[in-house]
Amino acid sequence: MKTKKRSMKIFLNGAFILAISALTISCSKENDIDVGGNTNIKIINASQGSNDQDFYLANNKITGDQAVAFGSATDYIMTTAGDNLTAEFKNIGTENIYASGEVNLERDLHYSIVLAGSGENTRIVSIDDNIEEPANDRAKIRFIHVSDVLPEAVDIYTSAGVVLASNVAYNSVSSFIEIDPSITALRIAPTGTSDYKDVSVTAFAPEKIYSIIIAGSGDVQTRQISHN
């Protein structure tokens, strides 16, 4: 009896169901896009030695004429939210894919999409961004650790030895913290060691939000990315 009722329902509503099925299949295969909402993405190139990069999401070029060089980033770009979206970095002006992966982007949020590593270690890292501004006299920073030279967790200090972030794992990101914006130098060391590297940073500005990218495949490189 249950089978007959189900067959009758399909017969009576066949055209409607076929239309819905076609729409569902087209939206849920390679790129499961939610066309009802948008999100915001910042594209960051942290791949030492890479060419300038174009970025594609769900087969659509997102960066327009703004190719992204190593150590640089785009402003936030509004795009379609969705799950299992194909993300591709391509050498500028070509169809040569430098790195590819999948990202999940929820609507009405902000993300950083980071190109990291080189050669067989080339990869894409997607990170949620918190763009709530800090207090008037403070800057807000976090650390994104994608350096292949340091494939272990790291600690980050001021030049005076004050801990800013500890045990930041490889391919991960620290929490945001508020700091005195006058800081101009940092020390980075593998967690639990005193074998640190001194790095310089550009003076921070009050009420600004930054990511410090710990990158590099041949040596440790840092880059300072602004979010607002």
Image: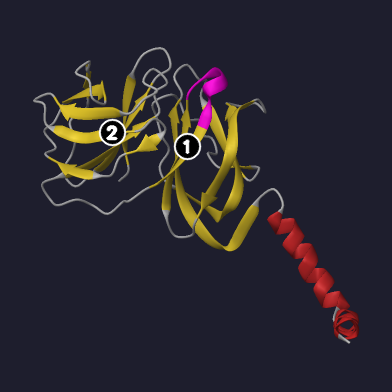
Label whose residue precedes the other's in the sequence (2 or 1): 1
* Residue 139 visible in rendering: yes
Give the x, y percent position of residue 9.
Answer: 85, 83
Dot 1: few (<14), some (14–19), or many (≥20) neighbours within 10 Å? some
Q: Quadrant of residue 119?
A: top right
Which residue lies at the image location 54% right of the left edge and 45% below the top edge? 103
Q: Reply yes or no: does residue 154 show up in magenta.
A: no
Q: Which of label 2 and label 1 is nearer to you?
A: 2
Magenta stretch, residue numbers = 117-123
Q: Quadrant of residue 87?
A: top right
Q: Could you tell me which quadrant the N terminus lies in?
A: bottom right
Q: Would residue 215 be found to the left or right of residue 164 on screen?
A: right
Residue to which mark 2 is pinned? 167
Which residue lies at the image location 67% right of the left edge and 28% below the top edge? 95
Relative depth, front residue between 45 and 105? 105
Q: Which amino acid does label 1 sit on?
A: Val
Give the x, y percent position of residue 198.
Answer: 20, 18
Residue to which mark 1 is pinned? 125
